[in-house]
Amino acid sequence: ALLASGTDTTPNQSSFGYNPRNHVPRFSLNRHRASKALENPETDPDGLRSIFGQLYQALPMSKCANFATATAGKQLWNVDFAGEGSIDVGGPFRESVTLACQDLMSPATPLFLPSPNRTNNTGLNREKFVVNPSATTAQQLKMFHFVGVLMGAALRTKFTLPLDLPSLVWKQIVGESPTETD
């Protein structure tokens, strides 16, 4: 279950559901589990215990269908942080988005890597992350798809996704040709 402190990372039907009042998915995320996994990333190579990984598991594509018709300001899910007594009226939702993006820009997930400029300590964009070309398993490709779903939802609802990607990546996403300066 998603809330358990063991190693099972597969959510079950009791881990999440729909809030009947406003028909948005409702689930719990476990920050303690995510921080333990980040302390020792090799124990969670796919990043499924990270906040991003828990969000990915709690929101299967069938629950993301309503994201395509979301409007500005719409909260796409309700989240409770396990053991924290949070009540989601917007704050925990925004926090879950921020934490998921932080996980993507860290060793918590295998999808993105520090830019070569950071690795070599030279040039501009040292703080940026690039797509990990080795992240090609079926699971990782589904996770990339989920990142794309979040990007599309962010555009529709106007919530910010704090992803630190270089202009080279953003230009390709919006269909622009990269230049030498990218």
Image: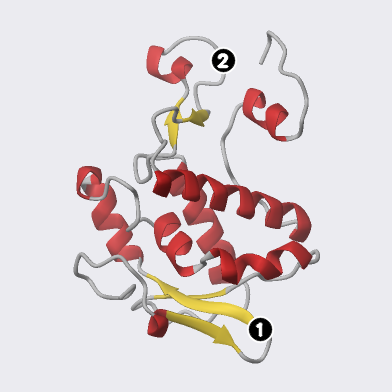
**123, 172: nearer the viewer:** 172
Q: Nearer the viewer, mark 2 or mark 1?
A: 1
Q: From the viewer's perspective, is 54 left or right of 180?
A: left
Residue depicted at 52% across the width and 67% down the height: 59
Residue type pointed to by label 2:
Leu
How is the rendered protein coloured?
Answer: secondary structure
Residue 156: percent from left, percent from top: 77, 57
Residue 6 horizontal side relative to residue 162, left or right: left
Locate the N terminus and report the quarter of the image it occupies. Answer: bottom left
- The quadrant in which the C terminus is found is top right
Quadrant of the image occupied by residue 109: top left
Q: Quadrant of residue 57?
A: bottom left
- Amino acid found under the numbered disc labelled 1: His
Query: Which residue lies at the image location 41% right of the left edge and 13% below the top edge?
Result: 121
Query: Tag 1's secondary structure?
Result: loop
Question: How far across and how far down the image is residue 81, in percent?
Answer: 42, 73
Which residue is situated farthest in the bottom direction here? 21
Measured from the top left, where is residue 38 in percent x and y? 28, 49
Q: Is residue 78 left or right of residue 8?
A: right
- Residue identified by numbered label 1: 23
Residue that lies at the very extreme toward the front in this rendered image: 138
| Residue at point 68%, 8% (across, down) | 180
Along the horizontal axis of the image, is 21 left or right of 111? right
Comparing 158 with 66, the one in front is 66
Q: Which residue is mark 2?
A: 124
CA separation, marks 2 and 1?
44 Å
* Above-or-below relation of 89 to 58: below
Q: How many marks?
A: 2
On residue 145, the disc is none
Q: Secondary structure at mark 2?
A: loop
**Is tag 2's residue or tag 1's residue first in the polypeptide sequence?**
1
